[in-house]
Image (cartoon, coloured by chain):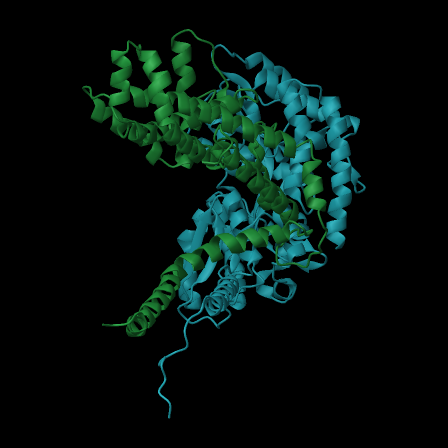
Amino acid sequence: MPADSHPGPPPLTRRSFGRLAAGVLGGASLAACAPGRDAPSRDTPLRVMACNHVWSQAISKYVPEFEERIGRRVSMSMLTADQLSNSYNVKLNASGTDIDVMMMRALQEQLLFAHNGWLADLTGRVTGDAAFRWTDFLQAARDRSTTAGKVLSVPIVTERAALYYRKDLVDSPPATLDELMETSLRLTDRGGNVFGFVGRGQRNGSVSQWSSFLYSFGGDFTIDGRSGIGRPEAVTAYEFYGRLLREAGPPGATNMTLEQAMPIFAQGKAAFYVDADSIYTNFLDPKVSTVQDTVAFAPVPAGPKGARPYNIPSWSLAVSRFSLLQDEAWEFLRWAAGPEMVARIQADGIPGARTSAWSSPATLASFPPQLAAAMSKSSEIGVGHDRPEVLQVGRARDIVGRPLVAGILGGSVPTVVRDADAEFAEFLVRDNRYREA
Amino acid sequence: MTSTAEVVRAARPAVGGERTIARDNRRLKWLMLAPALAFVGLMIVFPLFYTLNLAFTDAFGAVNAAHSYVGPRNFLDALGDTRRFWPATGRTALFTAGAVLLETVFGLALAMLMRKAFRGLRLLRTLLIIPLLTTPLAIGILWLLILDPTNGIANHLLASVGLPRQEFLGSVSQSLPTLMLIDVWQWTPMLTLLLLAGLSTLPDEPEEAARVDGAGTWQRFRYVVLPMLGPTLGIAVVLRSVDALKTFDLLYATKGPGGGSDFEVETLNIYAYGLTFDYQEYGLASAVLVLFTVAIICVVILLRRRPGGRSG
């Protein structure tokens, strides 16, 4: 037997090393990209992704009860709304199994997530469970949870536009938008750093709050599937809101979202503020508010076409289609959005989506009486959306919000509206194409 | 007497041994390089090629959904977009050029000042490092609070000395200059430290000789120190420029998605991020990122080119 001059494994040549490296790289890439598909063990927690919202903070107090009930740990992550959305984009794009329950904004994300196939179909579960009482949810909220005939989410928080005002500065709230403008202008003292009105003015963020003004002037984002923002009533609404913030609002209004506008009212520097009714607790908390004794609540004043505030399901719960704990995730929804929990949460001052909770005097008693009355009125007359109902809501809001910015900055609103209307019309055609794809 | 042939024969085993060692060394070299190569492959090469591939598709909504190849359409759409892409390109260039120019001037001035020891130098050096150690996101939020037009301390100070209040980041026209100044505040110390290190390596003799020949302070700086500091200055400017081109956190933390209501601070980075996460248009976003990467490479090549036409 000839002696082997090179005992051991064959030499590692550059070529064979290249093959090995490519193999390792490819394998590692696939392993990194492919989510684990093993059956979860009893120790695997139920992962709930939530927005850092008053509802999540309230429900987290009760989560130990649920953990005991299902015998499984719940891991609840709380992020800001934008971070949450980005997190879904990253994880669900990789078909990640590390999200079971998703807290999401049905009006902002449901159509897109449904298009992407990221949401589990809950139709059989919600309708087949008598104790869950699906028909107890407000009709408008149920409509928003249903896409192409399938129930893909369950509403948990509802919001309506409300007028916050200072009762030490005005005797009674304005009944009409003209009165709001007139009083706001009168109370503005720029030298004294006090303003008649504050509201969101940032291009994208202000669209939802401006919607109540748009509807009250008789307009809408889309009419019969076509752009509605070029119509005269929309132009008037743009000009009105722009003038209100430009002449009676604080400086830097175009940079204002909820985070910037709310503190200005809470610090006593504005007489009126229009925003969602669900944030009222911020003005009653002495740690962040100097107006807890002087704040009062009213419905949004009426425009030429009456008072038409938005009335929407702002947050919902859904189950990720990639979740390996589908039954447990549904059990969480059943528990968190069930009649009993909604009543408990609403008694904590967080407006839910069940008619049983709204008709219960005990849960209504948790809200300041004026606010409860405003909520009740807005629920009756409200419009079920506060932004364009399209797949790419972010892009739509960017387009629709451009004339708002022009109005606040004192530019020519009709010129910008014409441009935005053409862009929005083109966008709607493309969005429809995506929907049909 | 030993013939040459015998010497060669006798040496053969040794040559064979050296070859084995050389071969072993080569193997060892590849093995030692393997983790780094794997990292570069996974984290840089693979994402680059994946992005390049996506740039030629109509990927929308979900990356893993079915999509078609559309050729160069996304590149043409981006290059033909005068509403967002070209203004964002202009802002990227303006922000980078403005911020890096000021940082270089101030950084050089501070480095020259700190070249000679003086009382309080240590304290000054420590203070200079603080902005460098703070994350841009925290700096953005900090300045957002300071410069808030209604509740911020900056306007209280201006008002207390009788100066008019400013909108700062709330203004469409003031936002970009304000953010450039914040960037200058944060990154000038980095230029200072790099240039200070460069200055400490320079020989004293040329400057001494110039002094003896009667050159003044400015002449010594302009004709002696600056040319000798050239290579360090070049590297510092390239490093900072590439970093400034990529600025994202500060802009996003202060102005949010889209770079403000009138897109006033929307740079290519912010635009690509918005296309990805706000619009889910992955094909177009990838094309913008590819174009941005090409632009960065061009900038680096330009900045590294020495006056004589040779690359440094």
Residue A192 vs residue A397: left or right? left
Q: Is residue B240 visible?
A: yes
Residue B106 vs residue A234: left or right? left
Decide: is B174 above or below A257.
Answer: above
Q: Residue furthest bottom?
A: A1
Q: Residue at x 49, y 55 (%)?
A: A341
Decide: is A302 above or below A396.
Answer: above
Q: Residue furthest left?
A: B119
Q: Tell me residue A404's x, y (percent).
A: 66, 26
Q: Quadrant of the N terminus of chain A?
A: bottom left
Q: Residue at x 77, y 27 (%)?
A: A418
Quadrant in the rendering for residue A158: top right
Q: What shade does chain A have?
A: cyan
Q: Is residue A294 visible?
A: no
Q: Tell me residue A375's x, y (percent).
A: 59, 38
Q: Quadrant of the C terminus of chain A?
A: bottom right
Q: Tell me residue A88's x, y (percent).
A: 54, 52
Residue B11 vs residue A341: left or right? left
Q: Nearer the viewer, residue A400 or B30?
A: B30
Decide: is B141 above or below A86.
Answer: above
Q: Nearer the viewer, residue B9 or B118?
A: B9
Q: Tell me residue A40's x, y (percent).
A: 46, 70
Quadrant in the rendering for residue A415: top right
Q: Residue at x 46, y 45 (%)?
A: A52
Q: Nearer the viewer, residue B191 or B207?
A: B207
Q: Residue at x 35, y 35 (%)?
A: B134
> The chain shown in green is which?
B
